[in-house]
Image: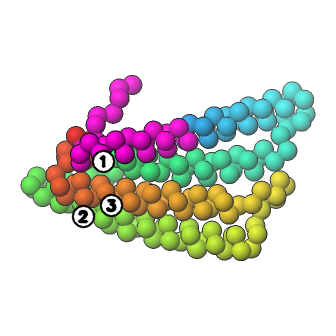
Amino acid sequence: MSAPAPYSGGPRLAGFLRRVEVLLGLIAALILLALMLVTCVDVVGRYAFDRPIPGGFEITELAMGALIFTSLPLVTLRRQQVTVDLFDSLVPSRYRRLQRSFLDLIAAACMGGIAWRIWIKAVEIGAAGETTASLMIPIYPLVYYMFFLTSITTALIVLLACLDRAGADESNPVYS
């Protein structure tokens, strides 16, 4: 596996984005490790000792939510989303940066809307005091975490739109 190319947009931005990428990657890796350990211990406990981890399913659900939303800004930053390029060949090459920037802004608006709705849900869940069924773990901290990472993703998409508009490398606008 090769190291990612340096980010475009100047050395300060490049350093910042690399630190964000490393931090999010580390958090995602730790969540995945915890998920694997819980699953392994739960399966061994269930089948070898007839003693599964109490609330193992709840822990897995919460960890999956955290993992998915931790990965969202990483996928966005690396431009690893699933894309459909049906109309790219119809757009003249001189307008592709503008097209990509425009589509990034649409994606940022959509992601911002999702972040807003997650915020509302987090407030509702916190006010209601909702917890998991058996372990009674409060759910609202995870939903606020999801809001935070969705907001980070929105900001990254706006940054990508600016880099696209400024003329970053067309093959991967974040990397130069």
- Residue drawn at 79 percent across, 36 percent down: 42
Q: Is residue 171 visible?
A: no
Circle 3 residue:
158
Q: Which mark is residue 102?
A: 2
- Residue drawn at 73 percent across, 37 percent down: 38
> Do tag 3 and tag 2 residues touch (Cβ < 8 Å)?
no
- Residue 48, image x, y percentages: 86, 27
Q: With 96 as the anchor, is 174 left or right in this view?
A: right
- Residue drawn at 43 percent across, 64 percent down: 111
Q: With 6 as the anchor, is 34 left or right in this view?
A: right
Where does the C terminus fall, quadrant-wise? top left
Magenta part mainly helix, strand or loop?
Answer: helix
- Residue 41, image x, y percentages: 78, 32
Where does the N terminus fall, quadrant-wise? top left
Q: Which mark is residue 110?
A: none
Was residue 83 drawn as part of the magenta stretch in this picture? no
The segment highlighted magenta reads: 1-28
Labels 1 and 3: the sequence-earlier one: 1
Callout 2: few (<14), some (14-19), or many (20+) C-alpha neighbours within 10 Å?
A: some
Judging depth in this view, the residue of 128 and 54 nearest the camera is: 128
Question: What element does badge 2 sit on?
Answer: helix
Name the amino acid type tagged 3.
Val
